[in-house]
Image (spheres, rainbow, N blue to C red):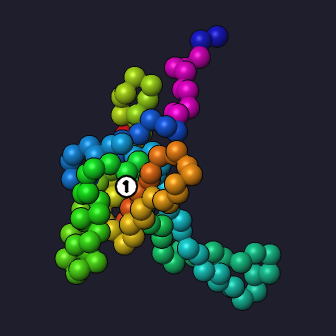
Amino acid sequence: MPTGARQDPLTNFRYQIEIEGLVVGGFSEVSGVQAELETEDYREGGVNGYVHKLVKASKVPNLTFKRGLTSSDTLWTWFQAAKNGQITRRSGSVIMVDAAGEEQWRWNFTNAFPVKWTGPDLKSDSGSVAFESIELVHNGFSKDG
């Protein structure tokens, strides 16, 4: 009996970051790609077997991008401008690609701006890579692909 096309899971390490149409890859970690619905309990008189769950709002956490520190100061400059009151909102995408490099999933975030920049832990006794991270607030995201 023939079966459908094989659907292998995507690997976690194949992704790209795109901001305003430009791939700005090189990030080693992305967190905050999640969404949640907040609910409110509503107890109906005479109904004792369950409590109604009504949707109040959706919420999304901040997105955090982490990468090895390079000579590019683009993330630092964007954060510094925001800190000085020059908020530049940018939209972008987190893109999952398969082993062949073909796009499989795309989460588009909107109107993001940085609220936190973290530099490397400076330790003279360590030969590890220096990392920076940027945390972005955003107005939610949608899924394409």
Residue closer to the observer: 46 or 32: 32
Q: Is residue 76 above or below residue 48?
A: above
Circle 1 sits in a helix, a strand or a loop, which is it?
strand
Residue closer to the observer: 135 or 107: 135
Residue 91 at least partly seen: no
Q: Quadrant of residue 87?
A: bottom left
Under mark 1, the amino acid is Ser
- Whether the magenta-drawn stretch holds residue 106 is answered as no
In the picture, the quarter occupied by the N terminus is top right
Residue lying at 71% horizontally and 78% vertically, measured from the top left: 51
Residue 15, position as x, y percentages in the image = 41, 39
Please tell me how crowded label 1 is: few (under 14), some (14-19), or many (20+) other residues with Cα within 10 Å. Answer: few
Q: Main secondary structure of the magenta part?
A: loop
Residue 136 at least partly seen: yes
Q: Quadrant of residue 89?
A: bottom left
Magenta range is: 3-11
Instruction: Find disc 1 in the rendering and name its residue.
Output: 142
Is 106 displayed left or right of 23 in the figure? Answer: right
Q: Is residue 74 above or below residue 12?
A: below
Residue 21, position as x, y percentages in the image = 21, 47
Residue closer to the observer: 64 or 6: 64
Residue lying at 72% horizontally and 89% vertically, measured from the top left: 45
